[in-house]
Amino acid sequence: MKDNLLIIGAGGHGKVVADIAIKMNKWKSIAFLDDNKNIESPLGLKVLGTTDRFIEFINDYDMFVGIGDNFIRSKVQNKLEISGANIPNIIHPNSVISDSVEIGIGTVIMAGAIINCSTKIGRGCIINTGVTVDHDNQIEDYVHISPGSNLAGSVKVGSSSWLGIGCIIKNNVNIASNCIIGAGAVVVKDITKSGTYIGVPARRLRK
């Protein structure tokens, strides 16, 4: 762990990440990189330059990708990992996480999230505000679980899937990689094919 934290992405998601990092009280300074030159000082923190300059800071800063888009986040984090960056987890002090939970690097867990025992969470995930993840879940890399979603026991979510706000996932259900689960959807059986699913119970949208 280094004394300073650099967050790549100063938009809405990046600001929430920074706010959590401030509450963690682990870094002497926190700053951003962002390609939008109109962003000046989100949350009163400095923007040190554009994202392609990260290598200049790699020796002095922990680095975290504060980008909500799963595909872009995975691309940027992979570049950081290859470059040897130190990538922490950002975990809100008001989350509740079992000691037996495994969490991959670059994952953020936000306020009010509850993650129960024997769950595994991959790299670069977003476990958003007020999410509940029950026992023995497997959340693969670069998954985004949106605010207020509830996952019962023994759920598996494939890599790069996005669960919209307020989703409910029944126990013992598997969700394939690269899926979008619409807001408020209820998933009651396995989803084996990538795509967009909406409704109660969730059904696949035809192209």
Image: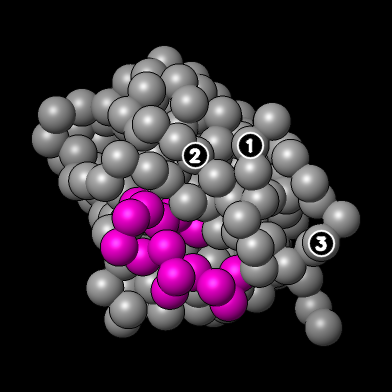
Q: Quadrant of the C terminus?
A: bottom right
The secondary element bearing badge 2 is classed as strand
Q: Is residue 1 above or below residue 204?
A: above
Report the magenta residues as a range. 51-67
- Badge number at residue 37: 3
Lower position in the chain sequence, tag 2 or tag 3: 2
What residue is shown with label 1?
Answer: 45
Front residue of 10/195: it is 10
How crowded is the residue under tag 3: few (<14 C-alpha within 10 Å), some, or many (20+)? few
Where, by quadrant of the figure, is residue 58 drawn? bottom left
Query: Does residue 105 sit above or below 44 in this rendering?
Result: below
The 10 Å Cα crowd at callout 1, few under 14, some 14 to 19, many 20 or more, is: some
**Relative side of 54 to 199, left or right:** left
Q: Position of residue 13 (x, y in %)?
A: 65, 45
Q: Kindly state the secondary structure of the residue where label 3 is placed.
A: loop
Among the two numbered marks 1 and 2 on one chain, the one whose residue lies closer to the N terminus: 2
Badge 2: residue crowd in 10 Å (few <14, some 14–19, many ≥20):
many
> In terms of depth relative to the viewer, which is nearer, 23 or 192?
23
Mark 3–mark 1 CB contact (< 8 Å): no
Comes first in the chain, label 3 or label 1: 3
* Residue type at the position of mark 3: Lys
Q: Please indicate whether residue 63 sits to the left or right of residue 45 in the image.
A: left
Q: Which amino acid does the dot numbered 1 rest on?
A: Leu
Q: Residue furthest right?
A: 38
How far from the left and from the top, in percent, is residue 131?
Answer: 50, 31
Task: State the residue in front, 56 or 71.
Answer: 56
Residue at image point 74% right, 40% down: 41
Between the C-alphas of marks 3 and 1, the distance is: 14 Å
- Residue displayed at 80% across by 51% down: 39
| Residue 126 visible to the viewer | yes
Q: Which residue is mark 2?
A: 30
Q: Amino acid at mark 2?
A: Ile
